[in-house]
Image (tube, rainbow, N blue to C red):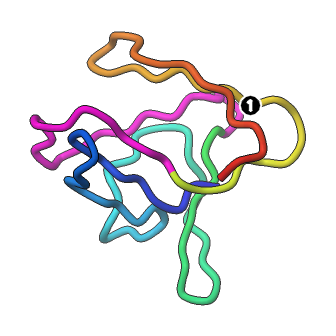
Amino acid sequence: MAKRMIIENGTKKVKEYNIGSLEDEPLLLTGYYLPESDNGQSWRWFGVPSAKVEIYFTDDLQDTDSGRLIGNPIKFGEISADVFFDGKATDHFEFGDQN
């Protein structure tokens, strides 16, 4: 489940999104489920059967160089992600058991 997304420039936080809060998340284009919430926290599950998530940022993030997705991966199976920016592959990582 995805809870927050933080966009940074070096070690400086530029923008933080609350995933699952319709008022405070980036524009999710594909690959997400409806938001869920409990005890004042919200989140979404990503992936859906297509296993592709597309996110569009309407904020000016021109002076940023990294992003972090904070949440908890599903506990079974191996999950990896390829990250693309403007159609170009920029990263690949394995989720594992870490948050």
Q: Is residue 3 above or below residue 94?
A: below
Say which residue appears at 89% left-offset and 42% top-offset: 76
Say which residue appears at 64% left-offset and 38% top-offset: 47
Q: Is residue 4 above or below residue 61?
A: below
Q: Is residue 34 above or below residue 73?
A: below
Q: Is residue 41 above or below residue 50?
A: below
As drawn, is 24 to the left or to the right of 4? left
Is residue 61 within the magenta segment?
yes
Say which residue appears at 51% left-offset and 34% top-offset: 53
Say which residue appears at 32% left-offset and 21% top-offset: 85
Q: Provide the residue span drawn in magenta.
A: 48-69
- Residue 20: x %, y % from top left: 48, 66
Q: Residues within 10 Å of mark 1 (few under 14, many from 20)?
A: some
Quadrant occupied by the N terminus: bottom right
- Residue 8: x %, y % from top left: 26, 45
- Residue 87: x %, y % from top left: 33, 13
The quadrant in which residue 19 appears is bottom left
Which residue position holds label 1?
Answer: 79
